[in-house]
Image: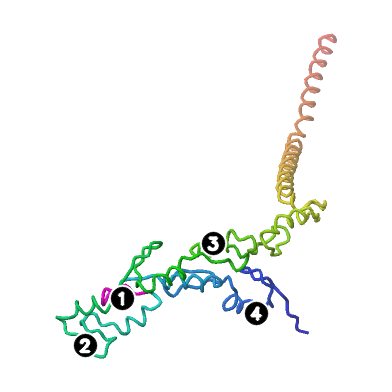
Amino acid sequence: MHVNFQVTCSLCNETVEREELAVHKGENCPQRMLACEYCEFPLPAIDLIEHQEVCGNRTELCHLCSRYIMLRERNVHESRCNGSTNNITESSRAIPSSNHDFHVSHSSPKLEKCKTCGDMVPEKDAEEHFLRTHAPVACSLCNETVEREVLAVHKRENCPQRVVTCEYCKHPFPAIDLFKHQEVCGNRAERCHLCSRYIRLCDRNAHERKFNGKSSRNTSQAERDRGALRTQQQEGPKLPRVLTIAITGIAVVLGALFYQRKA
């Protein structure tokens, strides 16, 4: 019988079938890393759309016509722009070189410097640029209003509804509930695999460090005892030799005294 085991994704803590884990991490996990198509910076997939809405509205200087173009329009613009030959291909006719500067000054949109980011944007799009790029937005997890630029950081580090993992049971919880959960979870007791005593989870690390240190001291003492025993065993045979010498000496003295009296 084929059994499908469920495992937890190490990126998002979602439980999936073991056989589908690789596909989940590669295609479906909201925490998998993807590159922004504009700046190529890696971001979690769940934050990519909001980032690209901001990043795509940044402007850069076109190397062909020297106009400021929003990044999200760069590919289309470059496919039409022919600034190197002084021909304006957006119109149906070519502009003579002598009239090019005059034509550009009148046909190009007036640019305005954004007071927030300093980018040059078309004057008519300035308000839209601010709303799409800099205006405060509501976090989709906790509904708190934050600056758009820090939304991704807020969701990842500060949002009280972001999902974090309990250090004892490894289950995911909203950050706002984690402290109370760990107070209860950390007071659960489990049997120590070293000493077979029941130890609270919150004390487990300290207990194991202490137990390992005690075991090391006991091991060192046992080794010292065994060394002393070996020394005694090696020195043991010396005692009878000393007694033999002493007895021999006494016998010689007694023999000499006895011989003198007899003489």
**Residue 68 falls inside the magenta stretch:** yes
Considering every residue shown, the one lying at the far left of the view is 98
Task: Categorize mark 2 by other alpha carbons within 10 Å: few (<14), some (14-19), many (20+).
Answer: few
> Distance between the Cα atoms at labels 3 and 1?
32 Å
Q: Is residue 261 above or below residue 194?
A: above
Q: Quadrant of residue 179?
A: bottom right
Quadrant including the N terminus: bottom right
Mark 4 against mark 3, which lies toward the viewer? 3
Residue at label 2? Answer: 94
Please state if 150 lies on the left or on the right of 57 as rendered. Answer: right
Q: Amino acid at mark 4?
A: Glu
| Residue plotted at (36% across, 80% down) | 75
**Residue 106 falls inside the magenta stretch:** no
Measured as percent of width and height from the top left, residue 33 is found at 53, 71
Q: Amino acid at mark 2?
A: Ala
Measured as percent of width and height from the top left, residue 251 is found at 81, 20
Depth check, front residue: 46 or 241: 46
Depth check, front residue: 31 or 262: 31
The magenta segment: 62-70
Residue at label 4? Answer: 20
Mark 4 against mark 1, which lies toward the viewer? 1
Measured as percent of width and height from the top left, residue 244 is found at 79, 27
Q: Amino acid at mark 1?
A: Pro
Depth check, front residue: 83 or 24: 83
